[in-house]
Image (tube, rainbow, N blue to C red):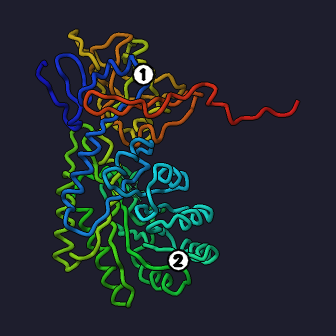
Amino acid sequence: MPSSLRLPGAPFVARRGDALYLEDCRLSDLAHEYGTPLYVYSRSAMRASLAEYADALAGRRHLVCYAMKANSSLAVLQTFAQAGCGFDIVSGGELERVLAIGVEGARIVFSGVGKTRAEMRRALEIGVRCFNVESEAELEVLSEVAQQCGRIAPVSLRVNPDVDAGTHPYISTGLKGNKFGIAHDRALAAYRRATELPSLRVAGIDCHIGSQITELSPYLDALDRLLDLVEAIEQAGIPVHHVDVGGGLGISYKDETPPPAGELVRRVLERMDARGHGERELVMEPGRSLVGNAGVLLTEALYLKPGEQKNFCIVDAAMNDLMRPAMYEAWMDIVACEQRHGLPQSYDVVGPVCESGDWLGRDRLLSVQAGDMLAVLSAGAYGMAMASNYNTRPRAAEVMVEGDRHWLIRERETHADLFRHEHLLPR
Ligand SMILES: *Cc1c(COP(=O)(O)O)cnc(C)c1O
């Protein structure tokens, strides 16, 4: 076998000779077999990223809850469930997904600023482990719903610690101006209220300060703010069982150097120990860092369009398949599945959707011809999960690989699927 060159940031992607592989699967073969656009995920990569959290947490009271909004495909959830992972959900739809793969309520925490009464009812019925409550108004409604169902709702209040996660404004969630969580200085009063309300039981405290975080310090600052509150709340006679520090750990898309998950865990545990909270259960809600680098999006180059100012490489994947570049101006690496040896040229890699914002990469050096397959790297998180049918485009298929084996885990949507639920008006 030719020597293998690992690509930075995506350790399960490697170039062997001219060919790009995910584990032992040649990506151009998968693109031809299943068609494009195609998401491909490495099961081993997902297991390895979860193991990094789990190993560092071994021997401590803990639960890792995969924030499934990052990638909610059933086979992905199954991979994590089999490894003993819990789940962080943000909607009734996500709840039904985890229930569909046989996860029990005790491994599910329910986050989100806008839970409906129906969602609360269903979550109570299946015995969800904890509601991460995001406002004082939600506390009142949850208590009412729980009382109607004859259940006790376990609650944790999501506190906004007012720390700057140093990330993109759209994915920063722990600052005062955000819609998320309960203000730090209102939290104690909210806990008091929770104990007055019938049908609620205080279980813990949580925060989630943002996404694609590449520094440790915002986590430690947020943890300190949470532990200050825990101490105040317990002094007021309200026991707080667990501390949930949320998710948000970044991955390497280009040259970012986030701390490894194990390092984050160790530093968090160290700080808890130092403050005398070593016995408290630690909950974490990683999303992106469990799946981001495990996936690639394969796409075929349809046309090369040279221009005066720019050359365009028009591909068959678009913003509806992968929203991150259009939505956050995110940079994601784009490489050829089979390397050519011609002189590379600079291209904007764009999709077929009728929007100037429909691009996957700008000013990329590529040696490419029409018909070539390209891979967008680190596309395992917030890729397929954010896909839409804009321009009446069917959503992509998904494949899971492990070693040299591969499985279709989601069929490509058909055109008939796209208007199956629509009705014409009476004539
Ligand atoms: C999105 C989200 C997460 C996961 O964030 P990542 O950046 O993907 O790790 C965790 N907790 C909550 C409440 C979230 O909304």
Q: Is residue 164 visible?
A: no
What percent of the width, then of the height, locates residue 126? 52, 64
For disc 2, does the CB lie below 8 Å from ligand 1? no
Q: Is residue 43 above or below residue 215?
A: above
Q: Compare residues 72 and 59 and report the one nearer the observer.
A: 59
Q: In terms of secondary structure, where does tag 1 sit? A: helix
Marks 2 and 1, how far apart in space? 48 Å
Q: Quadrant of the C terminus?
A: top right
Q: Name the residue at 36% across, 79% down.
A: 240
Marks 2,1: beta carbons within 8 A: no
The numbered mark, 2 or 1, whose residue comes first in the sequence reads: 1
The disc labelled 1 sits on which kind of residue? Tyr
Q: In terms of secondary structure, where does tag 2 sit? A: loop
- Please count the marks in the image: 2
Query: Can you tell which quarter of the image residue 270 is in?
Result: bottom left
Query: Can you tell which quarter of the image residue 4 is in?
Result: top left
What percent of the width, then of the height, locates residue 314? 43, 18
Residue 209 shows which numbered tag? none
Residue at the spot of label 1 = 34
The disc labelled 2 sits on which kind of residue? Ile
Q: Is residue 346 above or below residue 74?
A: above
Q: Name the residue at 40% across, 56% down.
A: 87
Residue 152 shows which numbered tag? 2
